[in-house]
Image (spheres, rainbow, N blue to C red):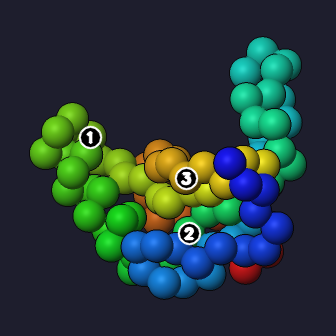
Amino acid sequence: MLKVTEAPICEHCGKKMSQWETPQMPFAGSTTWHTEFLYICFNDECSYFVNGFDWMWNNYHRTASYRHMIDPGNGLASPIPVKSRQHLKEAIIEK
């Protein structure tokens, strides 16, 4: 596991990922994140995000998707769920 010190490029669309400020007290006063920000791909044309709507509907009958996320503290990638194109964008630190 490696720390990520520069904005990575999304492996699904090739666009630079943005810093997203993690919530500091999301659940009953305890944080679920150990870093101040995460890297998230906010490209609305990213195939991972676009295809996620179909996948979520076909598998769970939910109108939602996910975006590609990388934890800068350990370099691990994972999906972060979103319910619309605008969801989470209010906390973008760096575009």
Amino acid type at circle 3 is Ala
Residue at 48% x, 59% y is 67
Amino acid type at circle 2 is Cys
Amino acid type at circle 1 is Arg
In the image, taking residue 16 as reference, residue 23 lies left or right, namely right
Q: Residue furthest left?
A: 58
Against 18, residue 36 (above or below) is: above
Residue at 68% x, 48% y is 1
Against 34, residue 15 (above or below) is: below
The residue where tag 2 is placed is 41
Residues at marks 1 and 3, CA–CA distance in whole angstroms: 23 Å
The residue where tag 1 is placed is 62
Q: Secondary structure at mark 2?
A: loop
Badge 2 crowding class, 10 Å Cα cut-off, few under 14, some 14 to 19, many 20 or more, is: many
Sequence-earlier tag: 1 or 3 = 1
Q: Which mark is residue 77?
A: 3
Residues at marks 2 and 3, CA–CA distance in whole angstroms: 11 Å
Image quarter of residue 46: bottom left
